[in-house]
Amino acid sequence: MDAQISTAKSKNWKVPFFTIWTGQAFSLLGSHLVQFALIWYLTIRTGSATVLATVTMMALLPGVFLSPFIGPLVDRWNRRVIMVVADTSIALVTLILALLFAFDVIQVWHIFT
């Protein structure tokens, strides 16, 4: 009986895994597209190569500096909760930026923040 339950559980891992994997892939794709668009928006708006370099650096540095420290912690924590919290916070910031763009009150410092 236990062998049947164990076999059934081992066959059903694919659906939850690919559901989470697909959602995370779309989330990361969307986040990177927004990041790319913001970098080029600032570059076009300011016409400055310095802004392009600074914004690109600000987009990449958190991952470079935080990954070695956060990675081991995330391995010990509940990964689903971490993904939900991270994706929700990114979605909220993106929504705030979208509202600022919609009301045409966006400033360069909003995006840097």
Image (tube, rainbow, N blue to C red):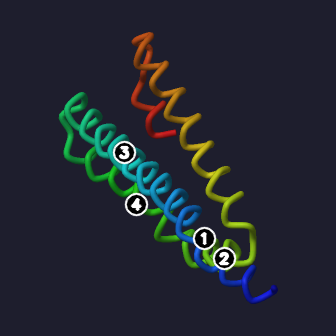
* Comparing labels 1 and 2, the label whose residue is closer to the camera: 2
**Which badge, 2 or 4, comes first in the chain's sequence?**
2
Residue, far front: 1
The residue type indicated by label 3 comes to Gln
Secondary structure at numbered mark 2: helix
Q: CA distance from mark 4 to mark 3?
A: 10 Å
Position above or below: 84 against 44: below
Q: Nearer the viewer, residue 70 or 12?
A: 12
Q: Are marks 1 and 2 in contact (CB under 8 Å)?
A: yes
Of the numbered discs 4 and 1, the one sitting upstream in the chain is 1
Q: Amino acid at mark 4?
A: Leu
CA distance separating discs 1 and 2: 6 Å
Q: Residue at x 58, y 76 (%)?
A: 11
- Gap between marks 2 and 3, in whole Å? 42 Å
Q: Residues within 10 Å of mark 4 (few under 14, many from 20)?
A: few
Dot 2 crowding, Cα within 10 Å, few <14, some 14–19, many 20+:
few
Mark 3 crowdedness (10 Å alpha carbons): few <14, some 14-19, many ≥20: some
Say what amino acid the circle numbered 1 marks.
Asn
Residue corresponding to mark 4: 60
Please tell me whether mark 4 or mark 1 is closer to you in this view: 1
Q: Which residue is mark 1?
A: 12
Which residue position holds label 2? 8
Q: CA distance from mark 2 to mark 4?
A: 43 Å
Percent position of residue 20, x then y? 55, 58
Mark pair 1, 3: CA separation: 36 Å
Residue at (47% x, 28% y) in the render: 97
113 or 71: which is nearer to us? 71
* Rendered residue at 65%/51% (across/down): 84
Which residue in the protein does label 3 denote?
Answer: 35
Residue 109 placement (x, y as % from top left): 46, 32
Rendered location of residue 93, percent (x, y) = 55, 35
